[in-house]
Each structure stands twice: as C-alpha cells, then as structure tokens.
Image (cartoon, rainbow, N blue to C red):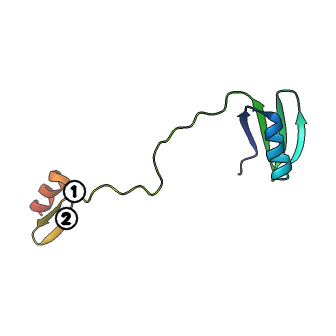
Amino acid sequence: MSIFHLAYHVDDLDKARAFYGDLLGCTEGRSTETWVDFNFFGHQISLHLGPVFATANTGKVGAPPDPPRPQTRLRGIKVRGRGPAFAAVCMAL
C-alpha cells in the first residue's frame, strides 16, 4: 500500500501554487480560498492555510559515533564494552 493523501499547512497559497504547479508541474485540482489540492505524481496533496509545522535542530546525520567502548580480556578472548554482568557470565563459562 502506498501513500495517497498528504495534507500540509502553508502560509501562502499563491507561493504554494507557484511551487507545486509551476515549478514541479503538478496539476491543480479542487480549491477554495483556504486550501488547494494537487495531483502530486499520482498522490493527492492538500495544502491548507495555517500555521506551518515547527522545525528544530534535532541532530546531524553523520555525526561522530559514540566513543569506543572499553575492552576487557576474558580467558584470552577480547570482549568489547558489554558491562560487568556480561563479564561475570563469561568468567563462569
């Protein structure tokens, strides 16, 4: 199953029409003074006047990984960062 109907708030319908209609070439469908529909490459996109979704900087893709875990040697086997409970089980083996 694929997405069919997407709805977003926009703060300017004229700019939205220019972007989706003129730039992307989407066919405009039904509309009123407060919303407009487009055929978005086989899906329906409805753009409604309203507060635009808030965004926030929640992290960076490709951020450096966590620092390496400490290494422990158990009976000649190198074990990486499993914690004392795991080490205790390995020692019992």
Q: CA distance from mark 1 to mark 2?
A: 7 Å
Query: Looking at the image, do the residues carrying marks 1 and 2 touch, with CB atoms under 8 Å apart?
Result: yes
Q: Quadrant of residue 71?
A: bottom left
Please give left or right for residue 6 compared with residue 59 in the image. right
Residue sitting at 71 percent across and 36 percent down? 8
The residue to which callout 1 is attached is 82
- List the single residue furthest toward the bottom: 76
Q: Give percent across and percent down for residue 79.
A: 19, 65
The secondary element bearing badge 2 is classed as: strand
Q: Give percent across and percent down for residue 3.
A: 72, 47
Image label count: 2
Question: Mark 2: which amino acid?
Answer: Val
The secondary element bearing badge 1 is classed as: loop
Name the mark on residue 27.
none
Please give left or right for residue 58 compared with residue 44 in the image. left
Question: Quadrant where the C terminus lies?
Answer: bottom left
Tell me if residue 26 can be seen: no
Q: Quadrant of residue 31?
A: top right
Q: Give percent across and percent down for residue 51.
A: 67, 28
Residue sitting at 59 percent across and 33 percent down? 54
Question: Mark 1: which amino acid?
Answer: Arg
Name the mark on residue 79.
2
Please give left or right for residue 43 compared with residue 29 in the image. left
Up the image or down, 40 lies above or below 36; here it is below
Up the image or down, 70 lies above or below 46; here it is below
Residue sitting at 77 percent across and 33 percent down? 12
Observer-nearest of 42 and 61: 61
Tell me if residue 66 can be seen: yes
Up the image or down, 75 lies above or below 15; here it is below
